[in-house]
């Protein structure tokens, strides 16, 4: 059964459709997460459909000097 899950995840990651990958997500200020976005974030796009999401913060972060 574990091998079946591995194959399913591998196929999902290699044939991700409209996904843009983690580099684009990180460049646009997002963070790739598995499953769900955490509280205070929203789904912006997919890093790898349908498992890994690109989540962005609801409020812009401020940098302290």
Image (spheres, rainbow, N blue to C red):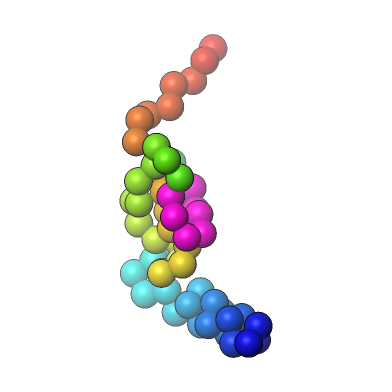
Residue at the extreme front: 1
Quadrant of the image for the N terminus?
Answer: bottom right
Residue at the extreme right: 2
* Residue at 39% from the left image edge and 37% from the top image edge: 40
How many numbered marks appear? 0
Q: Which of the 4 image quadrants contains residue 38?
A: top left
- The answer to whether residue 23 shows anywhere in this view is no
- The answer to whether residue 61 shows anywhere in this view is yes
Front one among 2 and 55: 2
Quadrant of the image for the C terminus?
Answer: top right
Q: Position of residue 34 (x, y in %)?
A: 51, 59
In reply to whether residue 33 is colored magenta, the answer given is yes
- Picture layout, residue 49 above or below residue 34: below
Q: Which of the 4 image quadrants contains residue 39?
A: top left
Q: Which segment is the magenta one?
A: 30-37
In reply to whether residue 44 is colored magenta, the answer given is no
* Residue at 35% from the left image edge and 30% from the top image edge: 59
Front one among 56 and 38: 38
Q: Position of residue 9 (x, y in %)?
A: 54, 77
* Residue at 61% from the left image edge and 80% from the top image edge: 6
Q: Where is residue 12 in the image (x, y as percent from the top left)?
A: 48, 77
- Picture layout, residue 55 above or below residue 48: above
* Residue at 51% from the left image edge and 74% from the top image edge: 13
């Amino acid at each position: 059964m574990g091998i079946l899950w591995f194959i399913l995840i591998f196929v999902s990651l290699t044939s991700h459709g409209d996904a843009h990958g983690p580099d684009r997500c990180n460049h646009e200020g997002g963070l790739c997460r598995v499953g769900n976005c955490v509280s205070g974030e929203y789904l912006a796009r997919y890093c790898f459909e349908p498992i890994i999401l690109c989540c962005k913060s609801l409020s812009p972060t401020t940098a302290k000097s």
